[in-house]
Image (cartoon, helix red, strand yellow):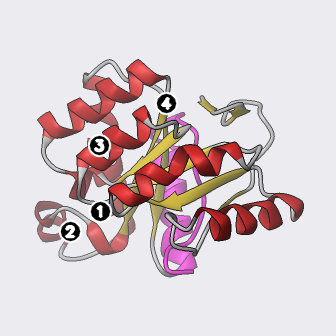
């Protein structure tokens, strides 16, 4: 897939991504931090998009940087749609907390219209209740089931510009989950540890 101009997956080199810890709507601080990250070798940047002020900052931030920008969305699908329309190169959503299938379809359709890829971000702290009950808590298998369920959902909307992360707060469970997931899909994987 492409994240802006950066290929991800297949035989492409591993791309280094980081996330800002500034208030995204503070354009000067956010751009300054991204430029320092670029100098350190960062090739893709993710910014938090918790509100419309952050969405409105995306185009100004992009004007000051040269690497692709990912909008990190939780809970409100309207922010994902606005971010795609506002120039984000990719979206990070957690289908477990973005809403139901019809809401996810709206996000996927908008992403397709704007040529934006989507990272399905499964976190140990936000698994679907039915999966937590089935596995009696957070396990590697539970996270993999959540990821596969959400991959299938996006693919059912004829959307295939997908990468996947499946993060726990401990390294051993994270590695176990990624090994299980990589045996079940050939989608590009975004590897990291949550709450790092």
> How far across and how far down the image is residue 17, in percent?
68, 56
Eye-nearest disc, 4 or 2? 4
The one of 129 and 45 positioned closer to us in this rendering: 45
For residue 135, which numbered disc appears in the image?
2
The reply to whether residue 157 is visible in this rendering is yes
Write down the residue under mark 3: 150
Q: Earlier in the sequence, mark 3 or mark 1?
A: 1
Q: Secondary structure at mark 2?
A: helix
Using the numbered discs, state the Cα–Cα distance from disc 2 to disc 3 in whole angstroms.
17 Å
Q: Are marks 2 and 3 in contact (CB under 8 Å)?
A: no
Q: Earlier in the sequence, mark 4 or mark 1?
A: 4
CA neighbours of label 2 inside 10 A, class few (<14), some (14 to 19), many (20+): some
CA neighbours of label 3 inside 10 A, class few (<14), some (14 to 19), many (20+): many
Eye-nearest disc, 3 or 4? 4
In the rendered view, tell whether residue 108 sits above or below residue 61.
above
The reply to whether residue 120 is visible in this rendering is no
Eye-nearest disc, 3 or 1? 3
For residue 116, which numbered disc appears in the image?
4
Q: Which residues are magenta?
A: 170-196
Residue at 24 percent across and 59 percent down: it is 75
Write down the residue under mark 1: 142
């Amino acid at each position: 897939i492409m994240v802006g101009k950066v290929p991800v997956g297949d035989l492409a080199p591993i791309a280094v991504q980081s996330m800002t810890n500034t208030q995204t709507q503070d354009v000067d601080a956010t751009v300054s931090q991204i430029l320092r990250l670029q100098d350190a070798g960062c090739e893709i940047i993710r910014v938090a998009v918790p509100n419309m002020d952050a969405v409105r900052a995306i185009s100004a931030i992009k004007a000051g940087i040269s690497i692709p920008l990912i909008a990190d969305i939780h809970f409100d699908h309207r922010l994902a749609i606005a971010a795609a329309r506002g120039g984000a190169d990719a979206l990070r959503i957690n289908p477990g907390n973005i809403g139901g299938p019809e809401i996810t379809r709206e996000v996927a359709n908008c992403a397709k219209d704007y040529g934006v890829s989507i990272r399905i971000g499964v976190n140990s702290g936000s698994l679907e209740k039915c999966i937590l009950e089935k596995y009696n808590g957070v396990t590697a298998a539970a996270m993999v089931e959540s990821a596969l369920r959400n991959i299938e959902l996006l693919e059912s909307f004829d959307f295939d510009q997908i990468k996947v992360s499946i993060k726990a707060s401990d390294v051993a469970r994270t590695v176990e989950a990624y090994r299980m997931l990589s045996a079940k899909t050939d989608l590009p994987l975004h590897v990291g540890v949550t709450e790092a």
